Amino acid sequence: MGLGPYLFLAVLEGLVQASVLTVTAVGLSLVFGVMRVVNVAHGEFFMLGAVFAWFVSTLLTGHPALGFIAALIVSPLLVGAIAFASERLVLKRLNYDPEATIVATIGLLYIFQQSALIFFGPNAQAVEPPFYYTIRFPWFGYSAYKLFVIAAAIVLMAGVWFLMRKTKIGLVMRATQLDRDTAQAFGISVDRVSAGVFTFGAMLAAVAAVLVVPIQQAHYLMGLDPLLLSFIVVIIGGLGSIQGTVVAAILIGLSDGILSVFFSPTLAKIVSTLVVAFVLVFKPNGLFGKAER
């Protein structure tokens, strides 16, 4: 078997990683773009989504698809409720001060992480995929569920685009992102927008976790890698730019998948970090970011 099939496999694996990363990173980008808050706890919302998915799926007996569908509904709602409470009780009281919210979200990170350790335990737990089916290519078989993850991410991103560009909610969010003071002067409740955006961003991370947990395993430390990669993607794409985040996530996901297959995951992380360094040096606002006026 020549190089072509291995490259095709690497591209497929990269697209799966890019899909999950896109959904996760868009949530982080929305929070920063609208609220100007660097949410260091974003990876832990991802982790909580996976943990809740495992918990919900174990409660339901029968076909694994039933547990998966229930987890896809219940887990983001639970994570969203936790995010909403965190925003109201912590971030709002700090008046969304950039420096203070970084420290506060670091605190939330450890609270969520250690709470998961206490109630969930230190062991990784597997979640069954909703279906077992292999698509046969000429050179190898590939999991149909992984292709489903790619398709689901595309549908989710289309939904986010529609929400941001074609609805009144999206218009309010974009207005708040452009100028909070002017938006407030026109009667927009900036506090309510901030609460909704923070909750929505966390729910996107939870959905990404539910999608990926049948491929990986639920673990109380699993939020660290998504957090790091999401920050890399948001910095490369441009802070607050959803378009840039999607493009950067695809590039980083593909490079990560290809380098991991042909070389090692460690090299993939090194390359991603070097790309961030070059972007910060030559294009500080990111590929699609705009300079502050």
Image: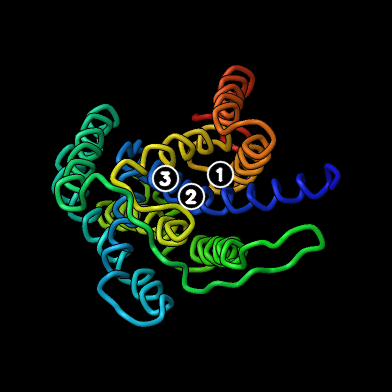
Q: Is residue 18 above or below residue 66?
A: above
Where in the figure is residue 290, as x and y percent of width and height? 56, 34
| Whether label 3 touches label 1, CB < 8 Å | yes
Q: Which amino acid, mark 2?
A: Val
Q: Which amino acid, mark 3?
A: Leu
Q: Which amino acid, mark 1?
A: Thr
Which badge, 2 or 1, is on the more N-terminal residue? Answer: 2
| Whether label 2 touches label 3, CB < 8 Å | yes
Which badge, 3 or 1, is on the more N-terminal residue? Answer: 3
Residue 47 falls left or right of residue 284? left
- Please give the residue where the numbered disc 1 appears in the rendered image: 245
Q: Work out whether residue 268 or residue 283 is closer to the camera in this orientation and state it.
A: 268
- Please give the residue where the numbered disc 2 appears in the rendered image: 26
Q: Is residue 185 visible?
A: no
Q: Give the quarter of the image for residue 261.
A: top right
Q: Residues within 10 Å of mark 3 (few under 14, many from 20)?
A: many
- Please give the residue where the numbered disc 3 appears in the rendered image: 28
Where in the figure is residue 64, as x and y percent of width and height? 41, 75
Residue drawn at the location 82% of the way across and 62% of the way down: 138
Secondary element at image label 1: helix
Q: Residues within 10 Å of mark 2 (few under 14, many from 20)?
A: many
Residue 160 falls left or right of residue 8? left
Q: Is residue 47 above or below residue 36?
A: below
Secondary element at image label 2: helix
Residue drawn at the location 36% of the way across and 43% of the way down: 223
Residue 244 falls left or right of residue 45? right
Where in the figure is residue 260, as x and y percent of width and height? 62, 37
| Whether label 2 touches label 1, CB < 8 Å | yes
Q: Work out whether residue 53 or residue 201 is closer to the camera in this orientation and state it.
A: 53
Residue drawn at the location 36% of the way across and 59% of the way down: 203
Q: Is residue 38 visible?
A: yes
